[in-house]
Amino acid sequence: MAMSIEEVEAAMIAKATKAPKPQLYIKDFYKCDPDRKPREIKNIANKLVSKGTLMFWSSGSTTMYALPSRIKDEEGDEGIN
Amino acid sequence: MAKHDTPMLDELEKGPWPSFVTDLKRQAETHPDCWDILGQLELSYRDKITHWKHGGIVGVFGYGGGIVGRYSDVPKQFPGVEHFHTVRIAQPSGMYYSSKNLRGLMDLWDKYGSGMTNMHGSTGDMILLGTRTENLEPLFWDLTHDLKQDLGGSGSNLRTPSCCLGESRCEWACYDAQDLCHHLTMHYQDEIHRPAFPYKFKFKFSACANDCVAAIARSDFAVIGTWKDDIQMDQAAVKEYIAGNYPSNAGAHKDGDWGAFDIKKEVIDLCPTECMWMEGDELKIDNSECNRCMHCINVMPRALRPGKEKGATICIGAKAPILDGAQFATMIIPFIKISKESEYEEVIDVIEKIWDWWMEVGKNRERVGETMQRIGLPTFLSVMEVEPIPQHVKEPRSNPYVFWKEEEIPGGWERDVVEFRKKHAA
Ligand code: HEM
Ligand code: HEM
Ligand code: SF4
Ligand code: SF4
């Protein structure tokens, strides 16, 4: 049975909650539903951002995803662009 | 009056060249925050380490790109640069602005930012340097509502596509670069404004091999105009060039003392594929050897023109450093029709084939050119469903092993893995 969008979203939120670092790459979410193409996973992640469940964290040249509660303020710890 | 002592920076005003220090001081007269850029930079020179912090969560609502967050790590000393975010404004196709539009943008930036700009950035956008987080939403509102303009891409987004001025002014254009650029910009709005990939991805469009936007050096996906048939030639005009009646390079070098035009030295001997020669007073070209570099056409524009069967070459995978050093794009598709009637479906097909593969196989922060290098061109060509041709080959192979796939062998072969494993442990 293919996973529903809600199930994929729940798996992504669980992943963002448990991951050792608060910022995740989009690739970190691919395994949340291996049957979906990466571009579908990306669309689901971006939906979660527009709902406010996840947020973007950008270094300038790479954009990552995070749970807002795990990012305290604008203090980025990755000194990379 | 200068707010900080900057003896080291002042050294940079002494040469005969333009100085960003002088520019910043002038700007600081009207935007006092700019004194703090100078102050902080002086401190960085003294400490021999940067005092900028990277990254964060700035942006405007609904967008995941277009603004690059930057902060000072010594904000108490330099409050003017506590926040110093960069804003990218998508440039119009071919960078045509009206002076009214430019004034509007500058007024906007005087109101909400430092007034400092960078035109244009290497991405192609207009770059507005230095503003505070709380100014972003009002700036974005005015930009989109009053000026009807938009932010460009940053981060893991599709970056603002850029193009040469193509058919609007240039007789060498082999396709309508501005229209293709605009079409794909509209088609991929979501990819431009929200992160779409493991890392950045850039399109650039040049309508001939002069490559005025340096697509081949700067873009993951370079579309470079070319032609399939023969260079169009006017032998009478060739004679006029030889007689010195037409200025070479359309007069671009006429002020220098270069002596009389010498077709052998300036054209034939510089043809990279050595496919030109004179027969009596007729110029000959072996078009099957010509690689469409544009050199001869640039020198004698009244005598030579691109062919009539026009389209583009697609080169993939250029990038500037981070992981592996700068690299040019690799020619993948020698000729593709660029057709407005199909709404550029052929080009879009190629783009999405790359994306599907790269998103799956590429590592985090790996540009598609690096993925191609890591996985190898043969695999990439088969992903792209492109038949290898001699022009794909960089050098003769150095390893003697030839691998066949089952479908390449008439009749194929069968291999019973279970049977094999009985004799050979995994
Ligand atoms: C020691 C200081 C710095 C270093 C080593 C550094 C290094 C880099 C590198 C490696 C890139 C990526 C280039 C690429 O696209 O491949 C970059 C991009 C960038 N940097 Fe810096 N940087 C520094 C300071 C700054 C400062 C002070 C600012 C602004 C206040 C800044 C703004 C940017 C911007 C806007 C980009 C483009 C981001 C993008 O790719 O979209 N950088 N920097
Ligand atoms: C000695 C001083 C400087 C030199 C020689 C220099 C040189 C350059 C060059 C060559 C580029 C690439 C331009 C292009 O290809 O479009 C660039 C880009 C850039 N510079 Fe500077 N720069 C200087 C100072 C600054 C300062 C003081 C700032 C900011 C306060 C700054 C911000 C930037 C940014 C943000 C970009 C990237 C624009 C983009 O995203 O494409 N630069 N700089
Ligand atoms: S790239 Fe070629 S077609 Fe485009 S403006 Fe330059 S010379 Fe003209
Ligand atoms: S376009 Fe370049 S390769 Fe072709 S004939 Fe002219 S100089 Fe030679």
Image (cartoon, rainbow, N blue to C red):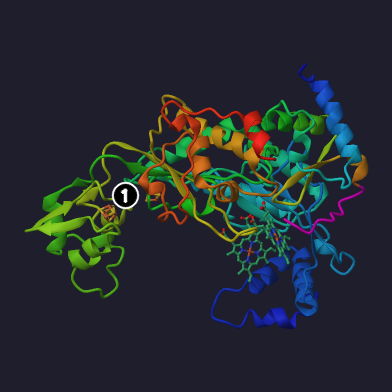
Per the image, is B289 magenta? no
Query: Which type of secondary structure does the marked residue at label 1 adopt?
Result: loop
> Is residue B39 in view?
yes
Q: Quadrant of the C terminus of chain A?
A: bottom right
- Main secondary structure of the magenta stretch: loop
> Is residue B214 in view?
no
State ligand 4's quadrant. Answer: bottom left
Q: Which residue is mark 1?
A: B292
Place residue B91 in its image quadrant: top right
Of residues A30 and B219, the one nearer the viewer is A30
Q: Position of residue B318 (x, y in %)?
A: 53, 52
Q: Position of residue B383 (x, y in %)?
A: 53, 36
Query: With B92 as the anchor, is A22 left or right in this view?
Result: right
Give the letter of the chain under mark 1. Answer: B
Decide: few, some or many residues near mark 1? Use Cα within 10 Å; few <14, some 14-19, many ≥20: many
Of residues B53 and A30, the one nearer the viewer is A30
Total marks in image? 1
Per the image, is A73 magenta? yes
For the view shown, which residue lies furthest in the left direction? B280
**Dot 1 beta carbon under 8 Å from ligand 4:** yes
Q: Position of residue B411 (x, y in %)?
A: 43, 25
Residues rendered magenta in the picture: A72-81
For the view shown, which residue lies furthest in the front direction? B423
Of residues B189 and B272, the one nearer the viewer is B272
Q: Is B118 drawn above or below residue B5 in the view shown?
A: above
Q: Position of residue B170 (x, y in %)?
A: 35, 46
Q: Residue at x 6, y 58 (%)?
A: B280
Q: Quadrant of the N terminus of chain A?
A: top right
Amino acid beneath label 1? Arg
Of residues B379 and B65, the one nearer the viewer is B379
